[in-house]
Image (cartoon, rainbow, N blue to C red):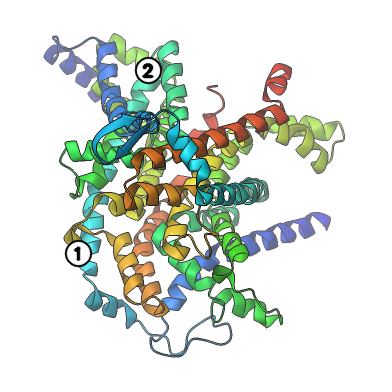
């Protein structure tokens, strides 16, 4: 009897948490369905009446939303595979290094995790200018060539470390190349980690607000986060429109997350974080 | 399956007799990550440190001025305000974020389908793009018809003016940071899972209750995770104030939400005072480093490591 009470209480707490954390996203979507031009609500409105989808086509007329979406997609679709590839081979190589180098790379990566974004704002600009990437979408894709974030390399490293070493030793004795070992042997064993990195890096590139503010000036290269900021400057109190645009930018990451979350939250490669220190 | 793999190995042996030694191939795998990180992160970060000792206005040659930038910074009232705001923000946000992530991880670590759903829900606010997330809270915090004050109105509470009052505006930025704790939550879930079940079982045999085993087993074993998380959160949550303070309040009202990253941005990209901006950046993170050292001394990281 007591156990059953505890079970109920536990689920009740879970439901309260679920409600609380889904509330922000609920407000985005319900507020986007409100008819624009109506006076603002005077009491809490859980569902707008009348509800309408009109705001969505309207923002596409008002702003070149399709172009923003295309630019954001180009960046994400180019940057995510590069990120996953660079992080995966680097993580694999780290797991195969001898103890001394492995520890050095590990410490360097963890230190790099603590480097604040603002510290690279000023001079990444100069470097991107030397590369001729300022005011091109490459400026937004650039982090992918450095694996996006040391975190992704570490996630792969911890995943590859869990694979028993004998598997690789046998293949090495047979003369397999590093590439073959990674592509055929190791990579298929760390799919959940790859999924985690796909989600995290997609969200990072898709949501990136600071980089386009700093490095993109041509209006035809604006991405969705900048489009949102433009809409806000255009009509700062038209909440139904602003929330419709917010919904447009949120929907892809939400869909990706819902489809892949089972793999994402089951991934325990971070569980090894402390074992290595 | 087995057979094709052996065949593959053999063909690769024949075709690539000339290839690099295995170790060199591995170094090649590391090359993009190491080189990319050096070019995009290490060089800019080091250049920022160096430039903080020079007078540099984005054009021309940086002129060495020693500590002059730092002396100038102390003279600016706005710098003191930005540092104070950042400190208040971190003092409120970081402990609440870590505590929240820990409480949620403890509560939702259980197996079962529904618990998987609850865990996924906790992560959802973290993935909302920051531009959309900032706009959303601008709407939620609207004093007249935002959902939050209308909700408080249901209980006859007159909600505050939120973003138009200095004190509540700062609090608002803290509140919106409290929902994006997915990363810490997932890390602590993983940490909890790394604690062997047998520890709890033997504690139960010895007659410990849930509260005791939390203090005796869970917390000590989780403390290295909490420590790393706290350090990362100090850096990241300060950095993450940029988008909300830029989009929602642009530093106002009365500079109440002018945090260090926003002021650095203004100095560098509105006034092109790159030397000064770099100095402020360094000053901010040196102060943050001092906080970290303070925490380490207070908690006694060395002591607990010796015991273990």
Which numbered mark, 1 or 2, is in the foreground of this view? 1
Quadrant (top left, top right, bottom left, bottom right) of the C terminus of chain A? top right
Vertical placement of residue A208 versus B67, above or below: below
Q: Residue at x 52, y 41 (%)?
A: B74
Camera-nearest residue between A264 and B132: B132
| Label 2 SS | helix
Q: Which mark is residue B4?
A: none
Residue B254 rendering spot, x and y as whole percentages: 53, 63
Q: Is residue A268 visible?
A: no
Quadrant (top left, top right, bottom left, bottom right) of the N terminus of chain A? bottom right
3D distance between C-alphas at marks 1 and 2: 44 Å
Kindly identify which chain the residue marked by label 2 belongs to. Answer: A
Vertical placement of residue B297 versus B97, above or below: above
- Are marks 1 and 2 in one subunit? yes
Residue A28 rendering spot, x and y as whole percentages: 45, 71
Name the side, left or right, on which B157 lies relative to A67.
right
Kindly identify which chain the residue marked by label 1 belongs to. Answer: A
Using a 10 Å C-alpha cutoff, classify the residue at mark 2 as few (fewer than 14 neighbours), some (14 to 19) or many (20 or more).
Answer: many
Vertical placement of residue A31 versus B34, above or below: below
Using a 10 Å C-alpha cutoff, classify the residue at mark 1 as few (fewer than 14 neighbours), some (14 to 19) or many (20 or more).
Answer: some
The residue wearing badge 2 is A96
Vertical placement of residue B184 versus A56, above or below: above
| Label 1 SS | helix
Residue B8 rendering spot, x and y as whole percentages: 20, 21
Residue A220 rendering spot, x and y as whole percentages: 17, 61
The residue wearing badge 1 is A67
């Amino acid at each position: 009897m007591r156990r059953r009470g505890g079970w109920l209480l536990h689920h009740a707490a879970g439901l309260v948490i679920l409600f609380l954390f889904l509330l922000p996203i609920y407000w985005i979507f319900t507020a986007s369905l409100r008819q624009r031009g109506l006076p603002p609500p005077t009491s809490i409105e859980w569902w707008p009446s009348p509800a309408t989808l009109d705001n969505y086509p309207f923002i596409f007329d008002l702003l070149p939303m399709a172009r923003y979406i295309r630019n954001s997609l180009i960046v994400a679709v180019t940057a995510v595979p590069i990120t996953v590839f660079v992080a995966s081979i680097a993580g694999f190589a780290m797991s195969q290094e001898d103890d001394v180098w492995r520890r050095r790379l590990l410490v360097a990566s963890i230190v790099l995790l603590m480097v604040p974004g603002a510290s690279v704002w000023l001079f990444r600009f100069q470097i991107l200018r030397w590369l001729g990437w300022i005011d091109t979408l490459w400026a937004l894709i650039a982090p992918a060539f450095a694996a996006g974030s040391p975190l992704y390399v570490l996630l792969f490293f911890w995943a590859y470390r869990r694979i028993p070493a004998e598997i690789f030793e046998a293949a090495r004795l047979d003369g397999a190349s590093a590439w073959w070992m990674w592509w055929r042997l190791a990579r298929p064993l760390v799919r959940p980690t790859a999924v985690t990195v796909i989600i995290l890096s997609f969200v990072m590139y898709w949501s990136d607000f600071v980089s386009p503010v700093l490095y993109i000036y041509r209006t035809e290269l604006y991405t969705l986060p900048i489009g949102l900021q433009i809409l806000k400057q255009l009509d700062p109190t038209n909440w139904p429109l602003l929330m419709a645009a917010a919904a447009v930018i949120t929907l892809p990451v939400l869909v990706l997350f819902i489809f892949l979350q089972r793999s994402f939250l089951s991934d325990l490669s971070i569980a090894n974080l402390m074992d290595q220190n | 399956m087995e057979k094709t793999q052996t065949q593959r190995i053999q063909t690769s042996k024949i075709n690539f007799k000339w290839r690099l030694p295995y170790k060199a191939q591995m170094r090649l795998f590391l090359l993009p990550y190491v080189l990319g990180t050096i070019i995009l992160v290490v060089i800019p970060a080091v250049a920022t440190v160096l430039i903080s000792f020079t007078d540099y206005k984005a054009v021309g040659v940086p002129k060495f001025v020693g500590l002059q930038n730092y002396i100038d910074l102390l003279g600016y009232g706005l710098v003191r305000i930005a540092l104070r705001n950042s400190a208040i923000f971190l003092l409120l946000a970081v402990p609440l974020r870590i505590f929240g992530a820990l409480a949620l991880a403890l509560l939702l670590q259980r197996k079962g389908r529904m618990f998987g759903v609850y865990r996924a829900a906790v992560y959802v606010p973290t993935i909302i793009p920051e531009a959309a997330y900032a706009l959303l809270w601008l709407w939620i915090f609207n004093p007249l018809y935002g959902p939050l004050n209308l909700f408080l109105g249901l209980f006859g509470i007159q909600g505050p003016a939120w973003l138009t009052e200095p004190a509540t505006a700062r609090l608002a930025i803290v509140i919106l940071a409290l929902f994006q704790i997915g990363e810490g939550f997932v890390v602590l879930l993983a940490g909890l899972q790394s604690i062997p079940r047998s520890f709890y079982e033997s504690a139960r045999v010895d007659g410990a209750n849930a509260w005791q085993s939390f203090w005796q087993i869970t917390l000590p074993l989780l403390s290295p995770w909490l420590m790393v998380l706290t350090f990362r959160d100090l850096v990241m949550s300060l950095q993450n104030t940029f988008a909300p303070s830029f989009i929602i309040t642009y530093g106002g009202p009365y500079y109440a939400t002018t945090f260090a990253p926003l002021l650095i941005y203004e100095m560098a990209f509105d006034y092109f005072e790159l030397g000064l901006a770099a100095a402020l950046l360094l000053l901010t993170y040196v102060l943050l480093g001092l906080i970290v050292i303070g925490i380490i001394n207070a908690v006694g990281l060395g002591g607990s490591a010796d015991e273990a």
